[in-house]
Amino acid sequence: AAFRLLDSCSISCKIHGIRPQVFLLRFQLPMVTTESGLQYKDIKVGQGPSPPIGFQVAANCIAMVPNGQIFDSSLEKGQPYIFRVGAGQVIKGLDEGILSMKVGGLRRLYIPGQLAFPKGLTSAPGRPRVAPSSPVVFDVNLLFVPGLDDDE
């Protein structure tokens, strides 16, 4: 199933300091599709290192169901998510999508159901539920990789 462009631009633009016109223009770039079926578009390519498998990363994430409703956001919680990338601590599509990012990058991930929540996800009150094996969309900003960033 193809994903349509979501109307979460205003949230992502404010958070990441990108003008809406620039955000939308960057969505006209070609979509990258990996062998697993993960699709992504780089809104901003980072200048820092890419995280090696098993390293901790700090990333801000906005997680949405395909219609654009947010079911989770590190930004709303006021702190980035910190986890070991490639170690199975997050869904497979997020692991795969972050491994090829560079620190400072902003990427939209279109995660197919088999790489998302096979058993579904019950969200916080007032948030949409993620159905089993349903696709999800993540806006991810890779902030830093402890141990690889000289200035952190």
Image (cartoon, rainbow, N blue to C red):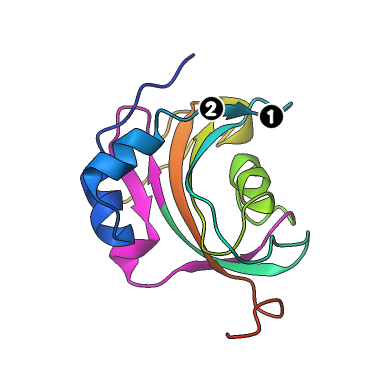
Q: Position of residue 77 (x, y in %)?
A: 33, 67
The residue tagged with tag 1: helix, strand or loop?
loop
Q: Quadrant of the C terminus?
A: bottom right
Residue at the image point whose x is 32% and y is 42% from the top: 23
Question: Between 103 and 93, which is closer to the camera in this rendering?
Answer: 103
Question: Between 45 and 64, which is closer to the camera in this rendering?
Answer: 45
Checking the image for residue 34, the label placed there is: 1
Name the residue type under label 1: Thr
Range of magenta residues: 62-86
Q: Quadrant of residue 145?
A: bottom right
Q: Is residue 17 magenta?
A: no
Q: Position of residue 79 (x, y in %)?
A: 40, 72
Q: Position of residue 130 (x, y in %)?
A: 42, 34
Q: Give the Cα separation between the discs numbered 1 and 2.
A: 10 Å
The residue tagged with tag 2: helix, strand or loop?
loop
Residue at the image point whose x is 45% and y is 68% from the top: 80
Checking the image for residue 31, the label placed there is: 2
Name the residue type under label 2: Met
